[in-house]
Image: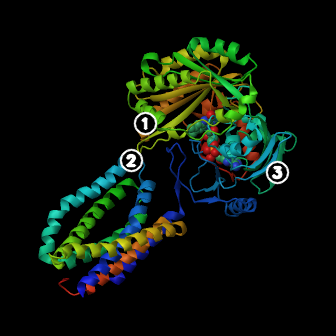
């Protein structure tokens, strides 16, 4: 008995070790489980350098990972080493006078906010939520609710980059400047961003103004009442998805500098994730049927009416809830899409989009938010080639092959419509778009890929995004 | 006397079982990804137990409690070696069915042994005392394992528990028959 048991015991242990040795990892989109060789992480620059050096010796590929909220395998590569930078997250220096902060790239916006809020400082650009790492955000060149600062690259002063040869370079608009436009929006393909110096701004008190409007009034409303009004600093809107009002109703939320800034002190406590049960419940309902979609839209609208006239600090606008979106279902997942269209094309674009997807029974669109991002072409892979509206879609889809096919077809159709209206689409999501679509949306893609070959000829830094599109 | 040994045995397997139970949920969490799957995993456990009680009951009277407890110990020792290897939800479902069966064997035998050994008049006192020792064992195990998980991995907890079960299997095999 002892012998049999010992043999089975040893067998199990060995199997277990080999399983552990090649972890299966996936990003938050959960459509791409990938077997990697190993996952490595460190809080020390020397160790990170070592990981790159070792990888060079053994010809291993490296995929860099932050919070892994990108959804198209931008942090994954089969058989590669995943370099998880989340622990490399110290705040190194705050220069209050010049409003500059230097941080290690694995730090999240949330951690920076907690640190700078007591100094009355705030971020210039971040996503609407604050759960992301700085490195991951720079690498996709994010944008958010701020309408006066556009894409994140505008707020980046400089950073240090650990390149494929294992050397550390200073990168800014003056030094190694070619890399500046490549690493911002570079999807981790040019090296590991080590520490970053970012421009901050003052925390301010905003008054919220909300209003319902029809989709065809939106462009005019936005130009007149938002862009041209200097005291409006942030903006966001939603457009309806329930079938009876599909892509017609909107409500807008504007954040304007409050007249009496001395009240700011009453609003600076940083919000925690508030009670998420209620939005979670309604979002859950909207996943199931039309009635649920209507309920979700109505509660969102009522909520927006309720906050009309209230006050909020800049830091709090930039830390919106996200937990309620966490979705745990084995056979389904939720994916994002984001399309950018020039402001003056908006109405015609929405009409076309409606025609394209209104009869797609199997396409479950849960939510669309609309924001603004002004033209900035500093990054080689820039999506903001004009002053644009950015539409973010939340889509509920199955993880089966059939579901992926259906969603893919609808998404490619939507991208065609977007491109027709001189628009672009966002790259951190699933690789549904075709290579032709990529090149049309990002005319400098070829240059980007050539530069990748120039700076990293051995393809030390790899991910599924590059694999899919560079050939 | 044998009854004492039985308490030692029960205390030991109680410890081993409580080592894994709370943490076993963590494993389910790694593998399963929805509450519905959780529900199914535990539902299957309860359902197999329910279906197997009648058979186990009969078998206990024919073959004796000792055989059943040996089956339980070795069954657990072996199945715990499979747990760390599970990575898909159906693996967990299958394991849960076996766990349900073995759980039923243990529950039934614990009670039959007690029923055969205690005095009707002092049953309350005796069973009370029995529970003190087994519960203390379980409590210590859960707390200690909590610390262990900080140092070891969940996987190693299963291996340690398996060794304890294997030991209990030998212990039971060496015990004289009948148990009481
Ligand atoms: C719920 C949700 C809301 C979102 N909202 C917005 C939004 O409002 N605005 C917006 O612009 N985007 C938004 N996004 C997209 C999001 O900004 C990107 O997916 C972003 O990359 C996520 O950051 P991360 O830390 O998860 O990065 P990861 O997904 O971990 O990494 C993204 C890319 O950056 C690279 N990378 C990460 N760290 C480093 C580093 N230190 N050095 C070099 N390369 C690195 C990775 O290799 C990868 O290619 C949203 C996404 C989700 C899921």
Residue A315: name its quadrant.
Answer: top right
Mark 2 secondary-structure assignment: helix
> What residue is pinned by disc 1?
A403
Count neighbours of disc 1 (C-alpha within 10 A) and say few if under 14, some if 14 to 19, many if 20 or more. Answer: some
Residue bearing the label numbered 2: B35
Q: x%, y% of residue B129?
A: 28, 76
Q: State which quadrant residue A401 falls in.
A: top left
Task: Give the chain letter at badge 3.
Answer: A
Q: Is residue A68 visible?
A: yes
Q: Is residue A205 left or right of residue B171?
A: right
In this view, the residue in front, B102 or B132, is B132
Please state the horizontal and vertical placement of residue B22, each as a whole percent of the image: 41, 62
* Residue A371 location (% of width, % of height): 63, 25
Asked if badge 2 and badge 3 are on a common chain, one would say: no
**How dense is the environment of label 2, judged by Cα within 10 Å: few (below 14), some, or many (20 and up)?**
few
Q: Does the CB distance between marks 2 and 3 fall below 8 Å?
A: no
Q: Is residue B142 above or below residue A217?
A: below
Q: Marks 2 and 1, how far apart in space?
A: 22 Å
The residues tagged by marks 1 and 3 sit, at their Cα atoms, a distance apart of 44 Å
Q: Secondary structure at mark 3?
A: strand
| Other-residue count near label 3 (Cα within 10 Å), few / some / many at <14 / 14–19 / ≥20 | some
Do discs 1 and 3 share a chain? yes
Q: In the displayed structure, would residue B44 be above or below residue A1?
A: above
Secondary-structure class at tag 1: helix
Residue found farthest to the right: A174
Q: Nearer the viewer, mark 2 or mark 3?
A: 2
Q: Residue at point 68% right, 41% down?
A: A137
| Residue wearing tag 3 | A169
Q: Position of residue A117 (x, y in %)?
A: 72, 41
Mark 2 and mark 3: Cα distance apart in space: 48 Å
Residue A338 left/right relative to A141: left
């Amino acid at each position: 008995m002892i012998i049999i048991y010992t043999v089975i015991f040893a067998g199990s242990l060995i199997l277990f070790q080999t399983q552990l040795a090649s972890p299966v990892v996936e990003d938050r989109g959960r459509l791409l489980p990938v077997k990697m060789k190993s996952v490595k992480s460190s809080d020390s620059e020397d160790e990170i350098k070592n990981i790159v050096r070792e990888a060079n010796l053994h010809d291993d590929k490296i995929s860099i990972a932050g919070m892994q909220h990108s959804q198209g395998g931008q942090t994954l590569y089969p058989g590669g080493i995943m370099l998880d930078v989340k622990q490399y997250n110290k705040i190194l220096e705050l220069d209050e006078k010049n409003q500059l902060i230097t941080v290690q790239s694995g730090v999240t916006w949330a951690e920076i906010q907690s640190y700078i809020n007591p100094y009355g400082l705030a971020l210039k650009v971040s996503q609407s939520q604050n759960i992301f790492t700085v490195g991951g955000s720079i690498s996709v060149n994010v944008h958010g609710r701020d309408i006066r600062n556009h894409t994140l690259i505008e707020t980046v002063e400089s950073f240090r980059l650990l390149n494929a040869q294992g050397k550390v370079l200073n990168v800014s608009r003056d030094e190694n400047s070619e890399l500046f436009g490549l690493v911002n929006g570079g999807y981790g393909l040019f090296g590991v961003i080590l520490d970053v110096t970012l421009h901050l701004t003052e925390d301010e008190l905003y008054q919220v103004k909300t209003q319902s409007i029809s989709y065809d009034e939106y462009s005019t409303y936005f130009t007149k009442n938002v862009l041209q009004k200097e005291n409006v600093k942030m903006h966001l809107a939603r457009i309806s998805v329930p079938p009876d009002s599909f892509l017609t109703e909107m409500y807008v939320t504007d954040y304007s500098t409050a007249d009496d800034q001395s009240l700011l002190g009453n609003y600076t406590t940083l919000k925690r994730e508030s009670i998420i049960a209620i939005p979670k419940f309604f979002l859950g309902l909207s996943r199931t049927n039309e009635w649920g979609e209507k309920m979700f839209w109505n509660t969102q609208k009522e909520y927006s009416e309720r906050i009309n006239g209230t006050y909020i600090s800049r830091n709090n606008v930039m830390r919106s809830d996200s937990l309620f979106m966490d979705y745990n279902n084995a056979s389904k997942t939720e994916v994002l899409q984001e399309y950018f269209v020039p402001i003056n094309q908006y109405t015609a674009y929405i009409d076309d989009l409606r025609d394209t997807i209104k009869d797609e029974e199997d396409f479950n669109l849960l939510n669309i938010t609309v924001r603004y991002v002004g033209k900035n072409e500093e990054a080689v892979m820039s999506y903001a080639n004009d002053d644009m509206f950015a539409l973010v879609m939340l889509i509920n889809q199955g993880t089966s092959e059939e579901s992926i096919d259906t969603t893919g077809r609808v998404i490619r159709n939507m991208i065609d419509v977007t491109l027709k209206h001189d628009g672009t689409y966002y790259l951190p999501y699933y690789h549904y778009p075709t290579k032709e679509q990529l090149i049309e949306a990002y005319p400098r893609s070829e240059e980007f890929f050539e530069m990748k070959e120039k700076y990293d000829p051995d393809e030390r830094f790899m991910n599924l995004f590059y694999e899919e599109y560079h050939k | 006397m044998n009854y004492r040994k039985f308490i030692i045995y029960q205390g030991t397997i109680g410890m081993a079982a409580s080592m894994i139970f709370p943490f076993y949920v963590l494993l389910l969490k790694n593998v399963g990804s929805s509450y519905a799957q959780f529900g199914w995993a535990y539902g299957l456990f309860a359902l197999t137990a329910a279906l197997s009680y009648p058979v186990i009951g009969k078998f206990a009277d024919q073959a004796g409690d000792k055989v059943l407890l040996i089956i339980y110990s070795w069954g657990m020792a072996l199945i715990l070696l499979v747990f760390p290897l599970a990575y898909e939800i159906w693996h967990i479902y299958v394991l849960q069915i076996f766990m349900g069966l073995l759980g039923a064997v243990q529950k039934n035998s614990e009670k039959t042994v007690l029923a055969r050994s205690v005095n009707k008049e002092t049953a309350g006192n005796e069973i009370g005392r029995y529970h003190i020792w087994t519960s203390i064992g379980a409590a210590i195990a859960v707390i200690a394992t909590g610390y262990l998980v900080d140092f070891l991995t969940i996987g190693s907890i299963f291996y340690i528990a398996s060794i304890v079960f294997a030991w209990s299997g030998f212990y039971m095999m060496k015990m004289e028959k009948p148990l009481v």
